[in-house]
């Protein structure tokens, strides 16, 4: 899996070499648009704590020893050894009063000013990692205004916002997990970081109440798997042992409405100890994640940059973009049935599938297709889940960031590289079930440090 990600990066670099664009920030604007964002009351909604909520891990309140470095562009803080705190309590974190100022979950106002963060994984010298994250203000019409650019000290592989947009987490290829305070696009500050034992960052997901982050690593030993990290009201990070160990872990998704249930892709091995299963159903209790079900639905190697679960909480879309698999170019539709997963159908002939992300309606999914330069639109039709449209001209896009709330709901950002124009940010808009249009393309200018990688927008 890491090898496939490196292949994708080589494709991006090759595309960059074709560009002669030197107009940083040039815009192409077809028409207008509208996006959105999240926030939170003092207490998370009852629905978010439904099934299994009493089994959440240890309290993620502020850590007394956390001290942010001075200055927006300060070097990364000293890393925690990854050993983490004492084992989790059996008491749920929500049982304790939450500081009214601990705005991690959705804000009552879904239309607060919103920020897009974009990682830049390439340095100025060939073979050198990039270590910066750029911030962009999302204007009311969906346009983007450049803000700060911060050096996090490591190559960014995944970015995710807490639901309020107050903090964003950045996961590095080397196992570093950092947290940024995002006051606005011009004021982004690195405030804490921890080092996790895993390598080969594969996914990063944050709970709907913003109290925990889940970092996934795709290594081949016992350090691979899912690490849960508590997020304090002040942004302090606290690893919650034990982690869920699974070799070759890949994409991870929480079940909508049931944040203590999750689906994990990965674990299938062709070496000792052998493992035939490629999908796991997980449940979270006082001692962290545990496996409650498993399935062997793929017969060959699977490579995915992100799976997705529909709003019904049962339908799982799993892309396989591996060029080395007989099942590559297939999008599997599976169902969660009790404590197992069953295959429903497969959509085939879809080259270089990368990442699935659901729109706010829970019924429309966007799937990036890197080398084809397409974002496919998948929807639940009378004939089942089908590709209903292909948005072309997107360039080499892997990551998708979608606004989930407010007037800007359904606004999509796709960082990409165009073979003709170089690094760019493409904006799309979900206008209804299965209906998506291209809004604009912003060119980022020449040079490998401009190549965009992972992205996240305040929900």
Image (cartoon, grey):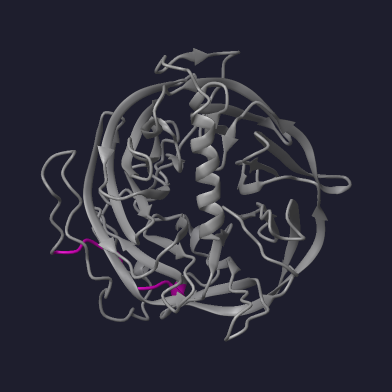
**Residue 56 is one of the magenta-drawn residues:** yes
Residue interval drawn in magenta: 54-64
Residue at x 54%, y 70% (from the top left corner): 248
Q: Is residue 161 left or right of residue 83?
A: right
User: For residue 410, what is the image quadrant?
Assistant: top right
Q: Position of residue 201 (x, y in %)?
A: 44, 59
Q: Quadrant of the N terminus?
A: bottom right
Tell me the chief SS of the magenta region.
loop
192, above or below 405, in the image: below
Q: Position of residue 319 (x, y in %)?
A: 68, 54
Q: Nearer the viewer, residue 11 or 358?
A: 11
Q: Position of residue 458 (x, y in %)?
A: 42, 39
Residue at x 64%, y 39% (from the top left corner): 371
Q: Is residue 98 left or right of residue 173?
A: left
193, above or below 135, in the image: below
12, above or below 445, in the image: below
Q: Residue furthest left?
A: 70
Q: Nearer the viewer, residue 332 or 205?
A: 332
Q: Is residue 441 visible from the viewing direction of this image?
A: yes
Q: Is residue 258 visible from the viewing direction of this image?
A: no
């Amino acid at each position: 899996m890491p090898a496939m990600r490196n292949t994708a990066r080589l494709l991006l670099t090759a595309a960059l070499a074709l560009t002669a664009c030197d107009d940083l920030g040039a815009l192409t604007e077809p028409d207008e648009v509208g996006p959105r964002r999240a926030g939170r009351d003092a207490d998370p909604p009852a629905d978010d704590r439904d099934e299994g909520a009493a089994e959440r891990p240890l309290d993620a309140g502020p850590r007394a020893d956390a001290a942010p470095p001075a200055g927006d562009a300060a070097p990364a803080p000293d890393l925690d050894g990854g050993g983490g705190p004492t084992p989790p309590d059996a008491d749920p974190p929500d049982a304790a009063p939450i500081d009214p100022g601990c705005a991690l979950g959705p804000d009552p106002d879904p239309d607060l000013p919103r920020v897009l963060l974009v990682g830049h994984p390439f340095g100025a010298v060939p073979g050198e990692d990039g270590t910066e994250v750029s911030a962009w203000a999302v204007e009311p019409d969906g346009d983007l205004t450049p803000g700060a650019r911060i050096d996090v000290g490591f190559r960014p592989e995944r970015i995710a916002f807490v639901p309020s947009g107050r903090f964003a987490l950045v996961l590095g290829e080397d196992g570093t997990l950092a947290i940024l305070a995002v006051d606005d696009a011009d004021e982004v500050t690195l405030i804490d970081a921890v080092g996790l034992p895993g390598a080969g960052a594969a996914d990063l997901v944050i709970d709907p109440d913003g109290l925990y982050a889940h970092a996934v690593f795709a290594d081949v030993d016992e350090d691979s798997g899912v690490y849960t990290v508590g997020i304090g009201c002040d942004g302090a990070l606290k690893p919650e042992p034990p982690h869920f160990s699974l070799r070759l872990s890949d994409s991870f998704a929480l079940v909508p409405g049931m944040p203590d249930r999750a689906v994990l892709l990965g674990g299938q091995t062709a070496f000792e100890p052998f493992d035939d299963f490629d999908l796991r159903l997980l449940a979270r209790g006082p001692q962290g994640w545990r496996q409650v079900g498993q399935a062997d639905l793929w017969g060959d190697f699977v490579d995915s940059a992100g799976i997705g679960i529909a709003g019904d909480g049962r339908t799982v879309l799993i892309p396989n973009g591996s060029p080395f698999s007989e099942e590559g170019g297939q999008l599997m539709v599976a169902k969660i049935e009790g404590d197992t997963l069953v295959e429903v159908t497969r959509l085939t002939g879809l080259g270089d599938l990368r990442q699935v992300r659901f729109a706010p309606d829970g019924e429309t999914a966007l799937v990036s297709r890197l080398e084809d330069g397409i974002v496919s639109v998948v929807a639940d039709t009378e004939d089942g889940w089908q590709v209903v449209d292909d948005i072309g001209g997107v360039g080499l896009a892997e990551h998708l960031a979608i606004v989930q709330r407010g007037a800007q709901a359904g606004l999509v950002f796709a960082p990409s590289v165009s073979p003709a124009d170089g690094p760019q940010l493409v904006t799309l808009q979900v206008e209804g079930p299965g209906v998506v249009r291209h809004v604009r393309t912003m060119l980022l200018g020449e040079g490998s440090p401009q190549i965009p990688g992972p992205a996240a927008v305040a929900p």
